[in-house]
Amino acid sequence: MITEQMLDALRDTLASELSEKRYRHTVEVERMAIRLGELYAPKQISMLRAAALLHDLTKEYSPDRHLLICAQKGLPVSRTELYAPKTFHAKTAAALIPERFPEFADEALIGCVRWHTTGREGMTLCEKLIYLADYIDLSRTFADCVTLRTFFFEARPEEMSFEERMTHLHRTMILSFDMTVRGLLEEGTPISPDTVGARNELICRCRAEEQAATEA
Ligand code: DGI
Ligand code: FE
Ligand code: FE
């Protein structure tokens, strides 16, 4: 069980390890994970808070340090990944949790950290919530992030049925992938197959739901 004291101790450790900017982002992702958790997974809030705190643990490591961790842990690095260095940190943070923070080394939590940057096909609800919390936390002022935050909250998800709220989560995520992919196309950066897989799955699901609604 994750207690308030464990979360406080984790926050203290991270405050001493991360830059001020990254720490500020991290605690804002924790706050957003609570808001999203209240809407979608109230029983998972403490796990979501811990995942939020740990999600960018290795974000400030150099590319060489990420590659060293992958080599030490026997994690294969694909060619696409090699040229997508901004995605390294999700993999290395997930890989370091069991030894550095064994008290938080739960499979569901590690999945949230592992998939927070690219997403993947078959994301769990908690993985989706951490992915979104990281995109729309209040420390983000980048135009795409503000657009996504407004899109999500202006629709008043708190007033929706759970089914409508899930569809809204998926539509919000599709918009996020569209904006990320647009940015990657402009940069000429490789797009992770996991990003494509996550987007395709959610698009097909939303289309099928729309079709079922018109046929009903
Ligand atoms: O670590 P944060 O900055 O808080 O956020 P993040 O983990 O979502 O990382 C965002 C960066 O990762 C952003 O610059 C876009 C990049 N990214 C996300 N998906 C992909 C990607 N980069 C590549 N090359 N391919 C992807 O599929
Ligand atoms: Fe990140
Ligand atoms: Fe982040």
Image: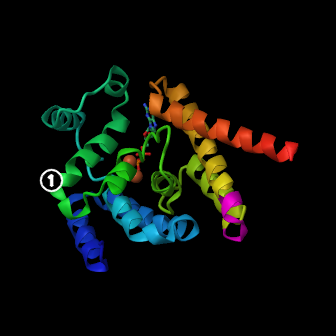
Residue 13: x and y in percent read: 20, 66
Task: Left or right? Give the position of 179 relative to 29.
Answer: right
- What residue is drawn where x is 37% and y is 29%? 84
Camera sees residue 60: no
Within-10-Å neighbours for mark 1: few <14, some 14–19, many 20+: few
Above/below status of 6 relative to 65: below
- Give percent across and percent down for residue 50: 34, 64
Q: Determine the residue positioned at 36% across, 55% down.
A: 108
Quadrant in which the N terminus appears: bottom left
Question: What residue is drawn where x is 15% and y is 34%?
Answer: 68
- Report which quarter residue 117 is drawn in: top left
Residue at (45% x, 25% y) in the render: 189
Question: In the rendered view, how is the structure colored?
Answer: rainbow
Q: What is the count of numbered marks?
A: 1
The residue to which callout 1 is attached is 99
Residue 5 in sight here: yes
Spot the residue most to the right. Answer: 215
Kindly tell me whether mark 1's CB lies below 8 Å from ligand 2. Answer: no
Q: Amino acid at mark 1?
A: Glu
Q: Quadrant of ligand 1?
A: top left
Place residue 44 in its image quadrant. bottom left
Q: Nearer the viewer, residue 9 or 141?
A: 9
Spot occupied by residue 105 in the image (x, y as percentages of width and height): 25, 57
Magenta part of the protein: which range?
Answer: 158-165
Local secondary structure at mark 1? helix
**Residue 6, image x, y percentages:** 25, 74
